[in-house]
Structure formats: C-alpha cells, structure tokens
Image: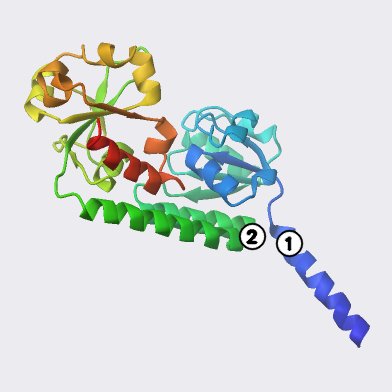
Amino acid sequence: MRLIFALCLIIIPLSLQADIPKRIITIGGSLTEIVYALEAQSLLVGSDTTSYYPKAAESLPKVGYQRTLSAEGILSLQPDLIIATEEAGPPVVLKQLQSTGVSLLSLTASRSLEDVKNNIRSIATALDRSEQADVLLKQLDLESEALQRALKETDESKKVLFILQHAGGAPMVAGKGTAANSIILLSGATNVVTGFEGYKPFTPEAIVAMQPEIVLVTTQGLEQVGGIESLLKVPGLAQTPAGKNKHIVEMDSLLLLGFGPRTAQAALTLHQMYFDP
C-alpha cells in the first residue's frame, strides 16, 4: 500500500502538468513583460515588435506588429498558446490561428491597474505561476500605495496634453479611451482633451485654446520629430504655457502606454516630473 500511494503522488502532478503550454507567443509588450515577471520566459518562443522589455525580450523571434499579424509567421514557431489582447489583429488572422487548433488566450487591453492585475492573474493561471503572481501582485500593490500617497500630498493638478507622433505622419492628440488618457489621470493630472475619444489631429487654434501646462510625449516620438526644439515648432504649441516654459515630459513608449507591471511606477515618476521640470 505504501508503494502504491507513493507512485500516485508522483503520477498525479505529472498528469496535471500535461496541459501547461510549452511554447508560447505573446502579442503585446505588456503581456511579454508579465511573462518575464512571472519567471516563465523559458516558455517564450516569439513575440511581437512592441515587446522589447526587459532587454532579453528584444532577442525573441518577432512575428510582426500586433495589429498587422500574419498566420504563417506565427505558426512557423509552432506555438501551443498565443497570449494577446483584443487589440491584436487583423481578426481574420486570429480566426486562421484558432482554426489550426492553437490555443488563444485573449485578454483586455489594460487601461487601469485593476486591468493589469487581472491580466497577471489570467496569465499566471495559464502558465501555472500562481506563487510568482502573488509576489508580483503584492509588489504592484505596494507601488500603487506609494503613488496614492504622493497624490494625496499634492494639492495641485497639472493640465497635460499628450501628443502622438509617428514617423512621416501628422501629430495627433490623445482623447478619452486611450492609454495616454488613462496614464495622465492615473498620475494625478488632467487631460486637456475632453471633446472626443481616440487620437485625432489638432489645429493650432485648438491647441492654444487648451492651454496645456505640460506636453507629454513618448521618447520614441520625440526622437522621430527631432527633439524638443523641433516639437515646439508644432503650430500653436509655442503659445501655450507648456511651450513657453518648454515643459515637455517624455517617457519610453512601452513604460508610458503599455499598462504592464511597471505602470504604477510610471505614474509616480510622471507625477514627480510634472513638478520638477
């Protein structure tokens, strides 16, 4: 009886582990960050081009940009699980992937710290990393508490304008429903764009009327436009408090807009930068 019982103790865990994926692809930089933070990076066989943090993620085979995927490139890596958000696409490619029998874990594109926590829990469940998730969630809670303390200690709120700049494209500003709007609010500031959702081009008259005190940009976008002096040449911007004071705040795109494990840290850093130009 003792021998039989001992064998059962060995066989049962092995059978439970049979459903844990062995080859995963992450579509979205924040999801890739979560996999690394859960110490499950050994399972990664590929990711999309927005996945460049931590540094080791840069060397993963890339399957393209998350919104313009191709089934052939993904399937060539022989994944048994694809982790993505609803922003991944196009939809026809996702249907092709599912028709092959590859499992797809579709998650919410985070816009809040609670969304981040839910995605951590979902990925941890899929990858059998519950202990690592507990540690990560506790750390996120501590960072969130530090952020809230900083916000309570500051009576003043800054008026912020986020400008999105792509290479060769016209600059756009971020309205409601965007990751930029969410991180602005999370950092204790006010988004001066309130009249629409998404990203839209702006007129010089509109930007002057909004009178932002701070212009928020990604580091990558600022580099593409040619630096702060070039950014300040955007029509209308020089006539705002932000332009006159050259109060431009920049942050890495994935850190700023990714809404991953580092988001509470990013919001706290932004809050500090608002008052220390």
Residue 37 appears left or right of 259: right
Q: Label 2 vs label 1: CA separation?
A: 9 Å
Along the viewing direction, whichever of 261 and 180 lies nearer the viewer: 261
Instruction: Give the numbered dot on residue 27.
Output: none
Residue 198's quadrant in the figure?
top left
Q: Crowdedness of circle 2 by 10 Å Cα count: few (<14), some, many (20+)?
A: some
Q: Is residue 177 above or below residue 226?
A: below
Q: Position of residue 131 (x, y in %)?
A: 60, 63
Q: Quadrant of the C terminus?
A: top left
Instruction: Give the numbered dot on residue 128.
Output: 2
Instruction: Give the numbered dot on residue 17.
Output: 1
Q: Residue at x 35, y 12 (%)?
A: 168
Q: Are marks 2 and 1 in contact (CB under 8 Å)?
A: yes
Q: Position of residue 269 (x, y in %)?
A: 34, 41
Q: Is residue 150 visible?
A: yes
Q: Could you tell me the amino acid type at mark 1? A: Gln
Residue 179's quadrant in the figure?
top left
Along the viewing direction, whichever of 7 and 275 lies nearer the viewer: 275
Kind of element beneath mark 1:
helix
Q: Position of residue 233 (x, y in %)?
A: 21, 11
Along the viewing direction, whichever of 79 and 215 lies nearer the viewer: 215
Kind of element beneath mark 2:
loop
Residue 152 appears left or right of 262: left
